[in-house]
Image (spheres, rainbow, N blue to C red):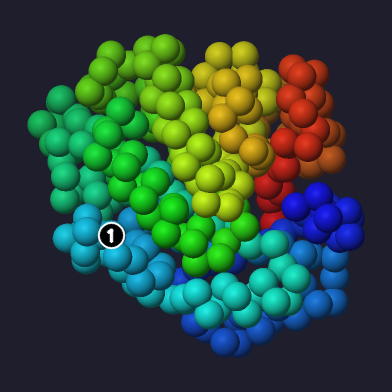
Amino acid sequence: FIKFKNSNGGIKGLYVNGYHMNNKNKIDSILEITEKTNINTLVIDVKTDNGHILFESNNELSKQMNNVRSKYDKTTIVEYKNKDLYLIGRVVVFQDPIFSKTFPNEAVYDSAKKTIYSQDGQYFIDPGSKLAQKYVLDISKEACLLGFDEIQFDYIRYPDSNYRFMKFKEENNYENRTGNINSFLKNGKEEINAIGCFVSADIFGFVLTNKLDGGIGQNLETLSENVDFISPMVYPSHYSSGSFGYTNPNKNPYEVISSALSDGLDRGIDPEKLRPFLQG
């Protein structure tokens, strides 16, 4: 990794929608960017927001859910590696409509509506679900063995909502939220590192500034102990008016992103671990 980073001036990547991986025109245009610019990394969906797995998985739960939508295989990944690209597999963790509907006892429950919780069409697995944690980790290890360099966990959090009728396996408090998120990451890092891949996590940008967990289980200091890299989504459009002193943060992208990252560094986070996602 250090050799790659030093010879390429760092890790600079693009997110690739995994559903496009078998769209030759789309992929050729992306690969052309990697050839003509300093982009040297691709973040490719492994497990999507829709709950789909985008390679031929042998996972028994996946077969039960019929959720494979194969778009690439090991040959594809090796081909990209031969182009000297660093490959990151994006795995959506606790937002999964297929898993939640198939295993409702493992989903966040809505006690008012007497059904599984839905947030604007999104369905969340209870982060305390051992069945879900093992399933996601098994899929991630399969993806690592396909040839990815790194597994990146997204939606590694509780629902970002104050809805008071959400019910979880455990009391919804800071200790349980951060405990479930970090135990999953700790186990994941140990097992995935052991077979040759790094582990990273996407987090909300405000986590760099918020000293607790924002109600979603993402606390900067504890997260950083359990992953190799953190990718805060420091999107200026997601910051409310007044953030960092700017009435319209979206019109001050440089200042907002710099301030957010500085907050993380000021809390002692290793600069090598901090790899922000930027807004296109």
Is disc 1 surrounded by few (<14), some (14 to 19) or many (20+) residues within 10 Å?
A: some
Image point (55%, 78%), residue name: 76
**Res. 115 image quadrant:** top left
Number of disc labels: 1
Q: Is residue 275 above or below residue 211?
A: below
User: Residue lying farthest front?
Assistant: 194
Q: Position of residue 130 (x, y in %)?
A: 27, 34
Q: Is residue 72 visible?
A: yes
According to the picture, the residue beneath numbered tag 1 turns out to be: 59
Image point (57%, 87%), residue name: 24
Q: Is residue 223 above or below residue 150?
A: above
Q: Position of residue 58 (x, y in %)?
A: 29, 65
Q: Amino acid at mark 1?
A: Asn
* 113 to the left or right of 28: left
Q: Is residue 124 visible?
A: no
Helix, strand or loop at mark 1: loop
Q: Nearer the viewer, residue 148 or 253?
A: 148
* 81 to the left or right of 110: right
Q: Nearer the viewer, residue 118 or 31?
A: 31
Image point (37%, 12%), residue name: 173
Q: Nearer the viewer, residue 103 or 150?
A: 150
Q: Is residue 192 above or below residue 19?
A: above
Q: Position of residue 194 (x, y in %)?
A: 53, 45
Quadrant location, the C terminus: bottom right
**Res. 200 image quadrant:** top right
Image point (25%, 24%), residue name: 168
* 257 to the left or right of 193: right
* 162 to the left or right of 12: left
Q: Position of residue 77 (x, y in %)?
A: 57, 73
User: Residue lying farthest bottom?
Assistant: 25
